[in-house]
């Protein structure tokens, strides 16, 4: 059977296992890349003929074309999932990826962004326009709650508890949900946008979604990222600022303010403490910078 024929069944399997749409799309892109690589070989992508050497060769190819180590590791994990599923379904006799060890991924320390820089970014949208008001509310919500961009763009009107000051996340990573606090400033901008800007963007197609584009449909991740880059440029801020960095800023600023790691873990929706510990390194880098600039012997 050809990999092409298994694209939809594999996606349905992932969907049933609770994988989010963006994760499934990432799996699909990796499988398509592997399929193209295999079509250049004699086996043409027939799964029964794929061997361990083919998987290793594909990973080496990805490294050769300059993919990051983390991306190559992710591709291996995806292939492991795919072949394990094939074997479980008895479509192959041997799993060619089972014996390939997963290299340890070097933890990347999130870049530190100061409170002053965040304030400068938040002040960039033109809040006299519906789209500017939306962007200000979106940035405030991501920074206040520590949301992933997908979580923010999936928010529905009923997910916001104005009285209690909480946001219900229904589309977390791995299909997990959580109910987390949101600050007063973000709530005020959100309320202002919903009462004024949003109704000027509204169409019936996405009536429950909070953040809409100019056509009244769901705002895309690409549009949000493009807007943040433009706002960062206009504020004279580093070009590496992204919506995801606002999430990192939420965590690192909470830590700097005295929050304990378990609270940050719950706020961000990390499944394990190791993912949250990287912010200790961010705090250490920040502390080192302050020490160097203020200590007489720094």
Image (spheres, grey):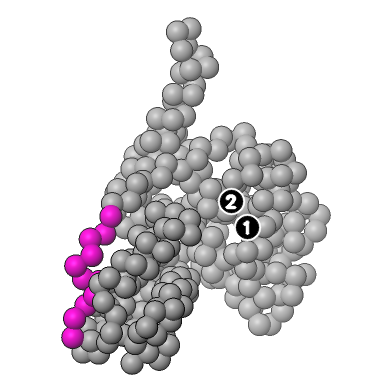
Q: Is residue 18 above or below residue 186?
A: below
Q: Is residue 180 above or below residue 194?
A: above
Magenta segment: does it hold 285?
no
**Image position, residue 16 (x, y; %):** 34, 83
Looking at the rendering, the stretch of residues picked out in magenta corresponds to 93-103
Q: CA distance from mark 1 to mark 2?
A: 6 Å
* Mark seen at residue 242: 2
Q: Residue at x 53, y 48 (%)?
A: 245
The answer to whether marks 1 and 2 mark residues whose Cβ atoms lie closer than 8 Å is yes
**Image position, residue 1 (x, y; %):** 33, 92
Q: Residues within 10 Å of mark 2 (few under 14, many from 20)?
A: some
**Image position, residue 100 (x, y; %):** 23, 65
Classify residue 244 as left or right of residue 19: right
SS at badge 2 = loop
Q: Can residue 46 be seen by looking at this rendering?
A: yes
Q: Which quarter of the figure has residue 69?
A: bottom left
**Magenta segment, prevailing SS (helix, strand or loop):** loop
Q: Which quarter of the figure has residue 176?
A: bottom left
**Image position, residue 157 (x, y; %):** 58, 69
Q: Residue furthest right?
A: 128
SS at badge 1 = helix
Q: Which residue is mark 1?
A: 225
Q: Residue at x 81, y 54 (%)?
A: 128
Classify residue 256 as left or right of residue 87: right
């Amino acid at each position: 059977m050809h990999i092409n024929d298994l694209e939809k069944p594999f996606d349905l399997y992932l969907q049933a296992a609770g994988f989010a749409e963006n994760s499934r799309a990432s799996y699909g892109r990796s499988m398509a890349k592997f399929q193209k690589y295999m079509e250049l070989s004699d086996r043409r992508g027939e799964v029964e003929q794929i061997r361990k050497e083919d998987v290793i060769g594909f990973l080496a190819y990805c490294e050769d074309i300059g993919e990051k180590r983390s991306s190559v590791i992710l591709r291996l994990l995806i292939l492991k999932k795919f072949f394990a599923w094939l074997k479980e379904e008895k479509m192959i006799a041997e799993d060619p990826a089972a014996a390939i060890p997963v290299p340890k991924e070097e933890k990347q320390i999130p870049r530190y962004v100061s409170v002053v820089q965040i304030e400068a970014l938040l002040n960039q949208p033109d809040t006299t326009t519906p789209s500017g008001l939306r962007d200000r509310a979106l940035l405030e919500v991501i920074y206040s709650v520590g949301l992933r961009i997908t979580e923010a763009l999936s928010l529905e009107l009923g997910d916001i508890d104005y009285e209690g000051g909480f946001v219900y996340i229904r589309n977390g990573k791995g299909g997990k949900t959580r109910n987390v606090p949101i600050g007063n400033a973000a709530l005020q901008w959100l309320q202002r946008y919903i009462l004024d800007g949003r109704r000027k963007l509204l169409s019936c197609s996405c009536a429950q979604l909070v953040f809409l584009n100019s056509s009244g449909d769901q705002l895309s991740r690409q549009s949000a990222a493009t807007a943040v880059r433009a706002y960062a440029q206009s504020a004279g801020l580093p070009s590496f600022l992204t919506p995801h960095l606002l999430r990192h800023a939420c965590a690192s600023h909470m830590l700097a303010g005295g929050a304990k790691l378990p609270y940050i873990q719950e706020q961000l929706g990390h499944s394990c403490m190791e993912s949250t510990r990287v912010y200790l390194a961010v705090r250490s880098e920040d502390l080192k910078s302050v020490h160097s600039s203020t200590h007489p012997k720094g």
